[in-house]
C-alpha cells in the first residue's frame, strides 16, 4: 500500500443544531506524528471519526493523496489503510493474544473445511510483537494478562501488520503509568521511520510535545492554531489551551 | 463426583446398567447444553428451549397424526417452524437491544401457551399418541432412539448423538473463524463491531442453533415414547444452563469450553441418577444442583475478574 497524505479543506460537521466542527482545514503527512490537542468537547473525536469513516462531514472536502474521498464505514477506511486504535476497545481481555491479533481477519487453511491456521497465527503474533520489543512465549495467554502498554502496542502492531498507513491513536497513554507510557511513546516514535502517518489525539501537553511534529489546537469545534514543533513550546501550547 | 457415588451407591451406580442410566440423562441435557453454551459464550440466553421441545414434539405429532404426513416430513416441517421461532428470538433480541433473558422468558410462555392452546383446539387433548403408526416412524426411530447393546445393556443412540454434537461444537469453537467470532461477540460487542465482525448475524444464528437442539431432543423423545405431550421439556432450559455453567461457561459471555460443558452434563446425569441409586430422597438432588450452580458461578466469576481487570 502507498503512503497516505490526508487533507481536510474547510470541513464542517453538524449534529442537528449542534455545530461540532467549523471550518477545519488540516494536512497530515506520512512519516509524521500529527497531534490533535484539545479539551473534552473540543471536536477531536468528531474530526477523527470523519477521517476514520465513522461518519461523513456535513460540508467541505476530505482528500487522500489529493483525491476526493468518502467512506461509507470504518471498514472501507481500513481497506485503504486508515486504522484507529481505540483507548479501551482495541483489545479484548478475555480473548487470547493471538486470537485478538487476528480478530476479524483470521488466517485459514484447508480446502473443504476452512479451519483456523493456529500455527501461523501464533508464530506471526510472536514475530510481530517482537518487532515492538515485546517478547511473548505463549500467545495463547489471555490478552488480559498483558500490561496496559503491551495491549496498546499489540493493537498498534496488529494495525500495521494488516497494512495500516494512517494510524489514529486515541489517547494511547491516558490510562497508563509513567513507565508503561514511556514504552508506548518509544514505539510510536519508531513508526515515523516506517513512513506511517500517525494522528495522535491527546490532552497531555507534555507528552504530546515530546512526540509530535505538528500540532493542531482545537477549542469548541474550531481549530484555533496550528504549529510545527519548532514554532512552539510546552509553555505556549499550555497558554493557548488554558486561555 | 463419580467416586463419591461409586462409594455410596456402588451396587447400581458402578454397573453397566447404572452407567447407561446416567449417560442417557446426560446425553439429552448434553445436546441441549452444547447449543445453550455456544449462545451463552456469544453473550445471550435462551430460556425458550424447554417449551420449544414441547412445541416441536407436539407439532410432529399433530402433523403426522392429524395431517397424515409421513413422520420425516412432519419432522422437517417442524424443524422449519422451530428454526423460525429461534430466528424471531434472535431478531427481537438484536433489534431491541434488550436482555435476551427477558425476551426469551416471554417466548417461553408464548410458545408453551400456544402449544397447549392449539393442541386443545385441534384434538381436545394435551397428549397425543399413536405416532408409531405413521409411515417413516421406523426409520426415524432407528436413527434417533434405537440402542446399541454392549454386555447385555442397551445403550441409547442419543449418547452417540451427544458425542457428535460435542465434537462439532468443540471444533467450531476452537478451530474455525466462526468460533473466534463467537468468543469475541460475547466478550465485547463493541470491540467486535469495530473489527468488522457481524455480531447480529452470529447471535441470530446461535438462537436458531439452540432451537435446532430443542427440535433434536423433541425427535428423540417422540421416537422413544411414540407420542407427544405439550409439557415435554419443562425446565430443560434451566438444566441446560446449569450444565453449561458448571462446565465453566461465563454468564456474562466471552468464555466457555464445550468439553467443560460435556462434563457439566455428565455431572448432572451422575448426580441425578446417583442419588436414586444411593437411596437418598431425590429431593436432595435439587439442593445439590443449586449448590453446584452457585459455586460454579462464583468460581467462574473470579476467573473473569483476573483477566478482565488485570
Image: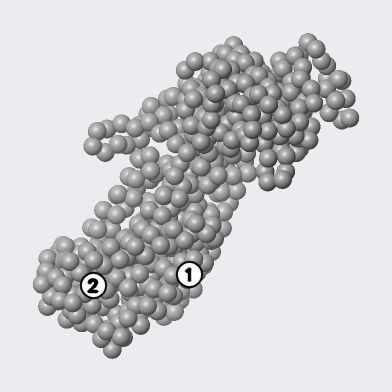
In this rendered view, identify the residue nearer to me: B218 or B8: B218
Q: Is residue B190 visible?
A: yes
In this rendered view, identify the residue nearer to me: B249 or B281: B249
How far across and how far down the image is residue A165, in percent?
A: 54, 20
* Residue on which disc 1 sits: B105
Q: Residue furthest bottom?
A: B124
Q: Is residue A154 visible?
A: no
In this rendered view, identify the residue nearer to me: A101 or B167: A101
Residue located 67% across and 29% down the image: A11
Local SS, label 2: helix
Residue located 53% across and 15% down the image: A3
Same chain, labels 1 and 2: yes
How far across and how far down the image is residue B60, in percent?
A: 23, 72
Q: Residues within 10 Å of mark 2 (few under 14, many from 20)?
A: many
* Alpha carbon separation for disc pair 1 and 2: 24 Å
How far across and how far down the image is residue A230, in percent?
A: 78, 10
Q: Is residue A109 left or right of residue A213?
A: left
Q: Give the mark, 1 or 2, whose residue is nearer the N terminus.
A: 2
Q: Is residue B244 left or right of residue B187?
A: left
* Residue on which disc 2 sits: B60
Residue located 12% across and 65% down the image: B139
Label number found at residue A89: none
Residue A232 vertical placement versus A180 (above, below): above
Amino acid at each position: 500500500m502507498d503512503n497516505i497524505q490526508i487533507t481536510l479543506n474547510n470541513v464542517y460537521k453538524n449534529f442537528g443544531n449542534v455545530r461540532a466542527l467549523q471550518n477545519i482545514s488540516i494536512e497530515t503527512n506520512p512519516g509524521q506524528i500529527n497531534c490533535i490537542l484539545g479539551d473534552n468537547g473540543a471536536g477531536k473525536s468528531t474530526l477523527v471519526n470523519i477521517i476514520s469513516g465513522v461518519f461523513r462531514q456535513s460540508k467541505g472536502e476530505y482528500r487522500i493523496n489529493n483525491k476526493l474521498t468518502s467512506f461509507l464505514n470504518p471498514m472501507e477506511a481500513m481497506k485503504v489503510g486508515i486504522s484507529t486504535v481505540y483507548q479501551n476497545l482495541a483489545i479484548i481481555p478475555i480473548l487470547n493474544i493471538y486470537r485478538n491479533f487476528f480478530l476479524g481477519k483470521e488466517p485459514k487453511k484447508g480446502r473443504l473445511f476452512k479451519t483456523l491456521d493456529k500455527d501461523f497465527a501464533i508464530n506471526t503474533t510472536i514475530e510481530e510483537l517482537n518487532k515492538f520489543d515485546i517478547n511473548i512465549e505463549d500467545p495463547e495467554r489471555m490478552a488480559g494478562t498483558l500490561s496496559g502498554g503491551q495491549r496498546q502496542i499489540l493493537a498498534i502492531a496488529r494495525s500495521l501488520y494488516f497494512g495500516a498507513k494512517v494510524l489514529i491513536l486515541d489517547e494511547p497513554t491516558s490510562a497508563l503509568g509513567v513507565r508503561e507510557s514511556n514504552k508506548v511513546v518509544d514505539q510510536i516514535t519508531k513508526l515515523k521511520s516506517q513512513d506511517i502517518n500517525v494522528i495522535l489525539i491527546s490532552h497531555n501537553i507534555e507528552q504530546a510535545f515530546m512526540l509530535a511534529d505538528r500540532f493542531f489546537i482545537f477549542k469548541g469545534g474550531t481549530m484555533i492554531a496550528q504549529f510545527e514543533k519548532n514554532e512552539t513550546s510546552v509553555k505556549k501550547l499550555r497558554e493557548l489551551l488554558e486561555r | 463426583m463419580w467416586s463419591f457415588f461409586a462409594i455410596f451407591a456402588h451396587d447400581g451406580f458402578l454397573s453397566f446398567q447404572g452407567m447407561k442410566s446416567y449417560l442417557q440423562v446426560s446425553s439429552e441435557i448434553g445436546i441441549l447444553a452444547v447449543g445453550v453454551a455456544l449462545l451463552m459464550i456469544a453473550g445471550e440466553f435462551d430460556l425458550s428451549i424447554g417449551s420449544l421441545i414441547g412445541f416441536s414434539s407436539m407439532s410432529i405429532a399433530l402433523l403426522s397424526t392429524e395431517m397424515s404426513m409421513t413422520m420425516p416430513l412432519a419432522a422437517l416441517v417442524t424443524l422449519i417452524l422451530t428454526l423460525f421461532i429461534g430466528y424471531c428470538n434472535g431478531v427481537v433480541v438484536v433489534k431491541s437491544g434488550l436482555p435476551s433473558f427477558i425476551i426469551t422468558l416471554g417466548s417461553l410462555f408464548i410458545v408453551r401457551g400456544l402449544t397447549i392452546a392449539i393442541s386443545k383446539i385441534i384434538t381436545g387433548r394435551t397428549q397425543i399418541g399413536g405416532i408409531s403408526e405413521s409411515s417413516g416412524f421406523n426409520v426415524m426411530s432407528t436413527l434417533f432412539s434405537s440402542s446399541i447393546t454392549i454386555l447385555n445393556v442397551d445403550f441409547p443412540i442419543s449418547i452417540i448423538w451427544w458425542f457428535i454434537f460435542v465434537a462439532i461444537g468443540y471444533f467450531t469453537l476452537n478451530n474455525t473463524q466462526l468460533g473466534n467470532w463467537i468468543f469475541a461477540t460475547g466478550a465485547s460487542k463493541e470491540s467486535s463491531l469495530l473489527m468488522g465482525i457481524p455480531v447480529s448475524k452470529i447471535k441470530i444464528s446461535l438462537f436458531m442453533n439452540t432451537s435446532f437442539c430443542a427440535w433434536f431432543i423433541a425427535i428423540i423423545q417422540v421416537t422413544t415414547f411414540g407420542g407427544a405431550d405439550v409439557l415435554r421439556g419443562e425446565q430443560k432450559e434451566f438444566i441446560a444452563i446449569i450444565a453449561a455453567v458448571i462446565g465453566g461457561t461465563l454468564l456474562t459471555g466471552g468464555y466457555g469450553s464445550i468439553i467443560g460443558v460435556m462434563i457439566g452434563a455428565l455431572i448432572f446425569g451422575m448426580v441425578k441418577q446417583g442419588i436414586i441409586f444411593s437411596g437418598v430422597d431425590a429431593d436432595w438432588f435439587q439442593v445439590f444442583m443449586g449448590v453446584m450452580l452457585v459455586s460454579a458461578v462464583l468460581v467462574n466469576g473470579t476467573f473473569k475478574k483476573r483477566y478482565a481487570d488485570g
